[in-house]
Image (spheres, helix red, strand yellow):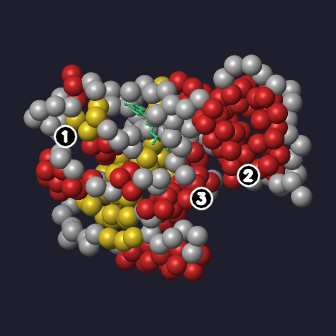
Amino acid sequence: MTTNTEKIFTFIDTYAQSKEGLYLEAIIEACEKWLQGDIQPELSETVTKEEIRRGIQLAILKGMKQHAQPHHQMTPDSIGMLIGHIAGKLAAGQQDLTLLDPAAGTGNLLYTAMNVIGNNVTATAVEIDDILVRLSAVTAELLEHPLTFYVQDALRPLLVDPVDITVSDLPVGFYPDDDNAVNFELVPAEGHAYSHHLFIEQSMNHTKAGGYGVFVVPANLFDSEQAASLHPYLKTRTIIRAVIQLPDSLFKNTAHAKSILVLQKPVEGVVKATPDVLLAKVPSMTDRHAMALFLQKIDMWVAES
Ligand code: SAM
């Protein structure tokens, strides 16, 4: 039997193949026509948000292969689900949760997390690449997720009220705009700043006191050339809550391995004992038993904090 996800992918793919021009543009067109009710995939009545997200995601992955761009990198579902699980537990019981992803790309990480967390979530997405924003905007409409989008350099002033949780798979590398980098504490004395460092600072600036930042960061974050300036920033401006190493098997090259960093923004005037930092390693994600135990460990850590 064909699943809803497959039907959605086939619907978009058939449309895109019938068009000349960029496949990614044709995905946007197909989704817009679906939203307007001009044409649509024939789905079973019980289609879920996850089935819609996955169907569109498969088409975007195909489009990205055909028109490779170095910054077109979608966050894999396994990472999105883990981040959704962590964010959902940190926000458990909280009504009307607000999220921010300052480097939202296709929105895949954000929507995977929103689907895990549930219904009472609104989010803000910032992304510099226009086509990725348009892809993520049509996806959000089809998923009926309440989203606000900003197409801009997220390290420029952001008109975003502080949110409960910032989630982001951070762009890694040098930030070329030295004139703007000087507005951040994490600007180095010489040379270009690291984008991912400035994104951490910007994200925490837009997170509520007591709120969290859950970031996908390079696994060598604490050993890099500019780590010396990151350490004091994290120590004085944030509370490091967890550093979770992702399995190497998720990355083509171990030099590009990533971890999940969970930070909390301190509440001014409230002095609390610094909680223990959770240092953990995610097991092979195909090992269901090991994964279930790992998620239990995360749940216990959240419950204890
Ligand atoms: N989570 C995303 C997804 O699932 O599609 C992928 C994020 S990707 C690792 C990082 C994103 O940051 C890219 O889409 C890139 O265009 C964006 N980016 C890089 N520099 C940026 C900047 N200064 N402001 C806003 N977005 C930026």
Percent x, y of residue 82: 51, 62
Would you identify the image quadrant in which residue 278 lies?
bottom left
Q: Please state, as top left, top right, bottom left or bottom right, where the C terminus lies in the image.
A: bottom left
Q: Nearer the viewer, mark 2 or mark 3?
A: 2
Q: Is residue 80 left or right of residue 305?
A: right
Of the two numbered discs 3 and 1 on the same chain, state the one appearing first in sequence: 3
Percent x, y of residue 56: 70, 41
Q: Residue at x 48, y 62 (%)?
A: 249
Percent x, y of residue 134: 60, 28
Of the two numbered discs 2 and 1 on the same chain, state the one appearing first in sequence: 2
Query: Mark 1 and mark 3 in contact (Cβ < 8 Å)?
Result: no
Q: Which mark is residue 51?
A: 2
Instruction: Determine whether the beta carbon of the residue marked 3 sits less than 8 angstroms from the nearest atom of ligand 1.
Output: no
In terms of image quarters, where does ligand 1 lie?
A: top left
Q: Residue at x 58, y 54 (%)?
A: 77
Q: Residue at x 45, y 64 (%)?
A: 247
Provide the secondary structure element on which disc 1 rests. loop
Per the image, the residue denoted by label 1 is 186
Identity of the amino acid at label 1?
A: Leu
Of the two numbered discs 2 and 3 on the same chain, state the one appearing first in sequence: 2
Tell me how far mark 2 sits from mark 1, CA to CA: 40 Å
Identity of the amino acid at label 3?
A: Val
Compare residues 209 and 59 and report the one nearer the observer.
59
Q: Residue furthest top?
A: 20
Per the image, the residue denoted by label 3 is 116
Tell me how far mark 2 sits from mark 3, CA to CA: 13 Å
Would you place residue 303 above or below residue 17 in this image? below
Sort mark 2 into few (<14), some (14-19) or many (20+) by Cα contacts within 10 Å: some
Sort mark 1 into few (<14), some (14-19) or many (20+) by Cα contacts within 10 Å: many
Q: Is residue 28 visible?
A: no
Identity of the amino acid at label 2?
A: Glu
Would you place residue 53 above or below residue 274 in this image? above
